[in-house]
Image (spheres, grey):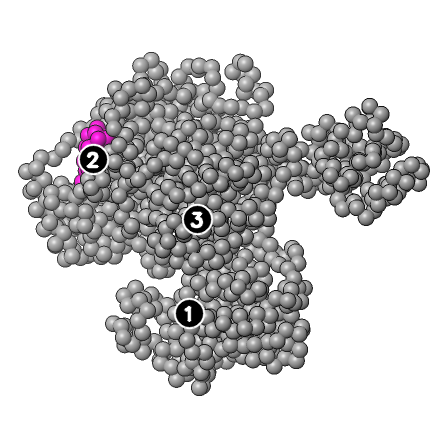
Amino acid sequence: MSLSLSLSHSPRRFLPLLLPAPPFAMPPRRDHTQQRWKPKAAPAPSSAAVERMALAPSTAGAAQVWVPRGYATSASSSSSSAVTAAEQGGAGDKLSRLIKGAAEFSVDNNTFTEAQIRATFYPKFENEKSDQEKRTRMIEIVSQGLATIEVTQKHSGSLFMYAGHRGGAYAKNSFGNIFTAVGVFVLGRLFHEAWGGKAPKMQAEFNDFLEKNRICISMELVTAVLGDHGQRPKDDYAVVTAVTELGHGKPQFYSTPEVISFCRKWRLPTNHVWLFSTRKSATSFFAAYDALCEEGTATPVCKALDEIADISVPGSKDHVMVQGEILEGLVARIVSRESSVQMEEVLRNFPIPSLDGGDSDLGPSLRDICAANRSDEKQQIKSLLENVGSSMCPDHRDWFGYSGLEAQSRNADKSVVTHFLQAHPTDYATKKLQEMIGLMKRKNFSASFKSYWNYQKVDSLSNDNLCYKMVIHVYSDSVFRRYQQEMRKNQELWPLYRGFFVDVNLFKANNKKAAELSKDSNTLLRNINGALDSSLSSKDGLADEDSNLMVKLKFLTYKIRTFLIRNGLSTLFKDGPSAYRTYYLRQMKIWGTSASKQKELTKMLDEWAVYIRRKYQNKQLPSSTYLSEAEPFLEQYAKRSPANQALIGAAGDLVQTENFLAILDAQRDEEGDLQPERGTAPSSPTSTSLDVVSKTEGLIVFFPGIPGCAKSALCEQILNTPGGLGDNRPLHSLMGDRTKGRYWQKVADERKKKPFRITLADKNAPNEEVWRQIEDMCGMTKAAAVPVIPDSEGTDSNPFSLEALAVFMFRVLQRVNHPGNLDKASPNAGYILLMFYNLYDGKSRREFESELYERFGSLVKMPLLKPERAPLPGDVKTILDEGMSLFRLHQSRHGRAEPSKGSYAQEWAQWEKRLRVVLSRNANYLTSIQVPFDVAVKEVLEQLKAVAKGDVKTPDTAKRRFGNIVFAAVTVPQADILSLLRKLGENDGDVNNFLNGIKVEDNLSKAHVTLAHKRAHGVAAVASYGVYQNQEVPVSFNAFLYTDKMAALEAQLGTVNGEKIDSKNDWPHVTLWTAPGVAPKEANMLPQLFSSGQAKRVLIDPPITITGVLDFY
C-alpha cells in the first residue's frame, strides 16, 4: 500500500505508517489562535541573547529537528558535579543557622517573592454532568465537527513527574521518598534500553534540557515493588502521559501529537492512542465500551477499538507484554478537531525509534535492587539512586538532606505561606499563584501548603533570601469542584492542578532595588494581566466546559480486584462477611452492574470471604500485597468453568513480590494510589421503574438530618395519623433522646422482635457508618428503608444551605425542656449544630441525594423553605461564617473536645451569645421563610404512603447500562406483528391453524430483528450501530416461514437518514416461536430447511412495513 493511498482511502488508519519517511522538521508548538497546524522548517539560529535549543539530541544523519520557541541553549552534557564534603560541611552549618533564624523573618515593604511551578499534572476538572451526559455531549460536539474524541489506555500505576535532576522528581503529593527514587530508576533504565552505550550522555542532556527549558514530564509508573493495584506487572516500566512547558506563565500542556514527537526524539515510551473524529466512530466507541465493560481485558479491548477508531497509534509498551491482560480502563477526552491531521504529520516525520540497548546488559533490575536491600527504606533509596548513575541523578539531597541535615529538617516553618501571600510578587506567575493560594486559604478549602527548604539552592540562601519547595496537596475532590465554581466567577484564575509543586523564593531588597522591582512588577502586571490567559480561554471554538470534557471508563475485571476485593478487606476483617456483602453489593449497584454479573460475583466473593477469613483468622490481609492471596484464588476459581473464566478475565502468572517489595511507610500511601478507590459519584436520579415494598417486609424510616429539622415532631404526627401509612403494618417510634445505650443496636433489637412493622428511627443519621448499620438491619430483618431529608438547595460542599442551618439553629434555640438538653438553655447549642453540619462537609446536595438513592432505592423530601423568599440577611450569614471558621480552628487543634475545654473557650462563649442576639433580631425573617409545618407533614405522609404501597418509582441514576449490550436489534411493536399474523391467517387456513396451535397471541412477548451479536459477529460489529441508536427503522416483512418446531417472519430493513441498515445475519428475520428445547438461534436455518423441503414459506405480497426502533440489548 502506498503512503498516499493509506492516508486517503483507507477507512481505518493504523499509525505509525510502515514506510520510511525523510526526517522533516517537527511542526512548532501550536499557536492557539490559529485554526490549522502546518509543518514548517526549523528556524535559523537566532542571534538573540536567549538562543533556541533543539527538542532532542542530534543524531547522525538527521537533517532537521523541531525547535520549540524560546528554548535555551543546552550544553552537550550536564556540568553538575558532586559537592565536596568540606564545602557541604560549611554550607550545612550555614543552613542550620538559617533554619533556626528563619522564624524571625518578617514581611515589610521591601519583601518580595518569586514563585515558579516546578512540576504539575493536568488540572482536575470536576464536570458536574453525569457520565452519560458527558458522553452525549462529547458525541454532539464531534458530530458538529468541533472536536475529536481521544482515547488512551489507563495503565494501573502511580503518577510520577520529573523536571530534571535539579528540577526534581515528584510523586502525586510528595518528593524525596521511595516512590520518587523508584521513578528515577525506572526512567534511567528506559534510557539504557533505548540508547544502549549512549545512555549516560543522553541522560545528562535530557536533564539539562528539562532544566533549562523548564519542562516537566508526567508518567504513569507501573511497578511490582510499590504495592498492588489490579495486576502485578510482568515488567517494571513507565509511560509518558503529559509533557508540560512551565515557562514563566500558566503551564502549557503538549497535545498528544506533540507528546509523541517529544517521546520519539528522546526514545521514551508512549501510550496507545485512538482517535474518533466522526459521529459514527464516536458512538461506536461508547457502544463498544458498554459491550466490553464487564468482561473486557487488554486484547479484546484493543482489537475492538482498532477496528472502530479513525486512527489507532499503538503504544511503545504493549500492555499485554509488560502489564498483563487486566486493563484498568480507558480515558476518553475532547481534543482539537485537527488532532487527526496533526497525528498523521507527526508520525510521518517521527518514525518509531530503534532501541539500541535491547540486547545489552542493563545491570541489576529494580526488583534485584529492592530484593538485595531489604534492611530499610533509606537503604533501598540509596541503592536505587547509586545504581541509576550520576548522569541521571548526580545529586541525592532531595532524599537525604544536606550535610547532616536529614529529611525531617526539610520541613520549613508554617509561616512561609503567610509570608508568601504578604510579599510583593515579582512577576505574573507569582501574582497568579498568590491569587490561587489566597483564595483557597480564605475559603478554607481542604488542602495543605507544606513548605520545605530547597536544598538545590543552598548556595544562594541567606537571612534575606530564603528558598523553599511548596507542595500543594488537595485532600478532597470536592475542593476541585468548589474551585471550579470560583473560576466561573473569576475567569482569570489559574486552574487547580493535580500533582502541584512550586519553588518559592522570599527575599529582601534595599530601598533602591525595592523601588525598581515594584515599578517593574507593577508595569509588568498591568501589561500582562489577563493577556496570557485570554488567548487560551477557549480552544477551537469550544466553551471551556466542553474543551475539558473527560470520562474515565473502567473495566469490571479490574474493579473486582481493586474495589471489591482489595478495598473490601478492612470491612471483611473488621465487620464480618455480612457487612462485606453489603459493601460489595452497594458498589455493584452504584456501577449499574448487570443482574447476571451481580449473581456471579456474589457467589465468587462470598467464597473469597470464607476462604481468606479462614486462612488469616483475625489478622487482616495487607492491601499492598493482597494479590499474593487473591490471584491464586481467582486462578483456581476461573478454571472451574468458561463462565468463571469470563468473570475473572485473566488469572495466573502471579509475580511473587515478597522478596523485593519496596519498604513503604504507611503514612505515604497517598502518592501511589494505594488509598482505597472510591466509586464514581452517581448522577442525579430520575424515576424509571417500580420498587414495590412488600407487605410481608418491614420498613425503617430514618432521618439524615440536623437537630432542628423537626424529625421528632414529624414522627409524632405520623404516629397520630389515623390509618398510619395506609396499610395494616403496626407503627413504632424510637426516640434517640429518650433511649439509653447504643441507639442503633436498640433499633436492631426491636426490629428482630417484630420485623414486619414500620419503625420510625427518631434520631439524626448523618453519616455512612449509620447508613451501613441500617442496611445491615434491612438484610437481617427483611426490611426496606426510606430516608427522609429536609429539602434544601445545599452549597457546593454541603447538602444543606446556610439558610437551612440558620432555621435549624433558630428552632433549637426556641425549645424548652428538650429531652436531649439541646435547647435555649444549652450553652453550646450553636456549636453542636455546627458539629452536625460539618459531618456532611464535602458532599454536594446532588452527591448526598444520589448516594441515599443508590443505597435505599427511594427518598422522601420534607419541605423546609419557601421558594419565594428574601435572601439571607447579612448579619446572619456573617455570624454563621464566623462560627464555621471558629469550628475549624477548634477542630484542628482540639478535635472533638468540648468548646469550653479548649483554647478558644472565650471565643466560643462570645460567639454563642452573639448568635442568639442575631437570630432573635431576625426572628420574623426566619419564621417567614419556613414552609408551614402542617403542609410539610402532609407532603411527607403522602410520599411515605407511596413508598409503603409501592406506588413510588425507584430512582435510576441515568448511567449507561454496564454489560447489558450483547446484541443490536430493531425492535418492532408486538401488537403490529400480531396484526400482521392475523391478516396472514385470514388468507391462509394452514397458517391460521398453525398460529392457533402455537397460541402465538399468548406466547409472543417480544419481536426484534437482530442486527449483530457480540459472540457471533464481534464487539466492533455490534458497536457500529451506535450511530443509529434510538432511531426509527422501517422493516418490510415479505414472507412467513415455519416448521413444527419454529416460525419466523422474513424481514428487509430500510434506511435511517438515507443510510441503509444492514444486518450482519445472512437472513434478517423476526423469530416468532420455537418449540420447547429449541434455541431461538435455530430459526436462522429456516431458509435452508425450506430449500430442502422441510419448511413451508408463505409469501406476503405486497410486503407489510412496520416501523421499529434500533437499540442495544
> Badge 1 local density, few (<14 within 10 Å), some, or many (20+)?
some
Give the mark, 1 or 2, whose residue is nearer the N terminus.
2
Choose mark 1 or mark 2, whichever is in front.
2
Residue at x 74%, y 37% (from the top left corner):
1078
How much space separates mark 1 and mark 2, taking CA atoms?
50 Å
Q: Quadrant of residue 1069?
A: top right
Q: Nearer the viewer, residue 33 or 118?
A: 118
The verdict on residue 256 being magenta is no
Choose mark 1 or mark 3, whichever is in front.
3
* Residue extent of the magenta highlight: 382-397
Look at the numbered discs 1 and 2 and tell me whether their residues touch, using CB distance below 8 Å.
no
Position in image of residue 288 (x %, y %): 58, 36
User: If the image is split into quadrants, where does the N terminus sit?
Assistant: top right
> Badge 3 local density, few (<14 within 10 Å), some, or many (20+)?
some
Give the mark, 3 or 2, whose residue is nearer the N terminus.
2
Give the mark, 1 or 3, whose residue is nearer the N terminus.
3
Residue at x 37%, y 50% (from the top left corner):
616
Using the rendered image of the protein, determine whether residue 510 is visible from the camera's viewpoint. Answer: no
Give me the disc on residue 611: 3
Residue at x 59%, y 68% (from the top left corner):
698
Position in image of residue 31 (x %, y %): 42, 33
Q: Amino acid at mark 3?
A: Tyr
How much space separates mark 1 and mark 3, taking CA atoms?
40 Å
Q: Amino acid at mark 2?
A: Ser
